[in-house]
Amino acid sequence: QPRPPLNNFSVAECQLMKTERPRPNTFVIRCLQWTTVIERTFHVDSPEEREEWMRAIQTVANSLKNQEPAADAMDFKCGSPSDGAGAEEMEGAASKTRAKATMNDFDYLKLLGKGTFGKVILVREKASGRYYAMKILRKEVIIAKDEVAHTVTESRVLQNTRHPFLTALKYAFQTTDRLCFVMEYANGGELFFHLSRERVFTEDRARFYGAEIVSALEYLHSRDVVYRDIKLENLMLDKDGHIKITDFGLCKEGITDGATMKTFCGTPEYLAPEVLEDNDYGRAVDWWGLGVVMYEMMCGRLPFYNQDHERLFELILMEEIRFPRTLSPEAKSLLAGLLKKDPKQR
């Protein structure tokens, strides 16, 4: 069974966005929960009511931000790893790394996101002057929330991969109570917000992003890793406008060509039919996710959407995909191929 939505999160550093889809007078609030983006959509009756709600949320966010002490970013203890269930696994997650670093090697500039599991902070390496995103996770919370497996998987995938369109890991280390991952900083923003602002991308632009995502997915598949969580929120842009896939917590390792897995996971709107049917599934789930993302880019909406998840899942399983008349035959052919219900035909 999928887990219920996590609603215990802070709106500090949240992002607010107006949209007219799927209904008029909608707004979206997005916060970072560990490495996962938490997104909630709200509908109100009028533009004025929407403005009032957004102002109120922003006021609370500003208040929380002002309460955040600068020293909080460096709330760490140095020493050996914590004891307890899961600690040994996490120690391994941070110990195997390409280079050594410590907390003292960085200047801490800005809180990029904060959630139950920890924080993501913009840092500058003192020796090189380079900027990175440091993900700092609290061990005790990861263990308590049963997230050790996802954390270890993400760490291992990051450490064992190197590709221009995957977020790179520079350093990994730990303190007594935290795991620290120093990541490449993709400062071009999230694809979600670029698309929200522009509503749709041209087919040429969607093709450009799609080709880079395909390159990254094929690389992961060649290393027997299935990503399983392709969605706009996990696609960042670097300073030159190239794709950077982030958040590897749902990756599944050791999936060779033709091998399958069974875990129900992912974001509801992006789930492939074979996942919903509780069937074994394989690499083709990533091509379905790519199809959903490319449909959003070129059509400005999800291919299947309903607020009721049961109805949404029915649409994904049964509904034929529909295309705007403005799409070229080539774009329709690509999307139809990626969004085949049968993974063997995808």
Image (tube, rainbow, N blue to C red):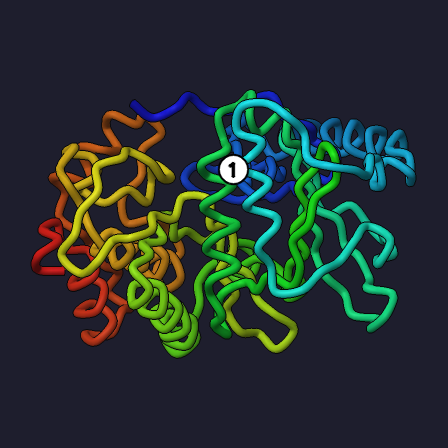
Q: Quadrant of the N terminus?
A: top left
Under circle 1, the secondary element is helix
Horizontal arrangement in the rendering, residue 265 relative to residue 103 (left or right): left
Image position of 31 with respect to 256: above or below? above
Horizontal arrangement in the rendering, residue 291 relative to residue 141 (left or right): left
> What residue appears at the point 52 percent right and 37 percent down from the top-left corner?
89
Q: 300 or 145, which is in the foreground?
A: 145
Residue 90: % across, % down: 56, 38
Q: Look at the image and tell me whether residue 233 can be seen.
A: no
Horizontal arrangement in the rendering, residue 155 relative to residue 319 (left or right): right
Which kind of residue does numbered mark 1 sit on?
Answer: Glu
List the residue tagged with mark 1.
89
> What residue appears at the point 27 percent right and 69 percent down from the top-left corner?
327
Q: Look at the image and tell me whether residue 220 can be seen.
A: yes
Q: 135 or 1, which is in the foreground?
A: 135
Horizontal arrangement in the rendering, residue 258 relative to residue 178 (left or right): left
Q: 223 or 248, which is in the foreground?
A: 223
Residue 66: % across, % down: 89, 34
> What residue appears at the point 39 percent right and 68 percent down from the top-left corner?
216
Dot 1 alpha-carbon crowd within 10 angstroms: few under 14, some 14 to 19, many 20 or more: few
Q: Quadrant of residue 97?
A: bottom right
Residue 308: % across, % down: 31, 25
Q: Quadrant of the C terminus?
A: bottom left
Label count reads 1
> What residue appears at the point 35 percent right and 59 percent down from the top-left corner?
299
Q: Quadrant of residue 62?
A: top right
Residue 95: % across, % down: 61, 50
Image position of 21 with respect to 201: above or below? above
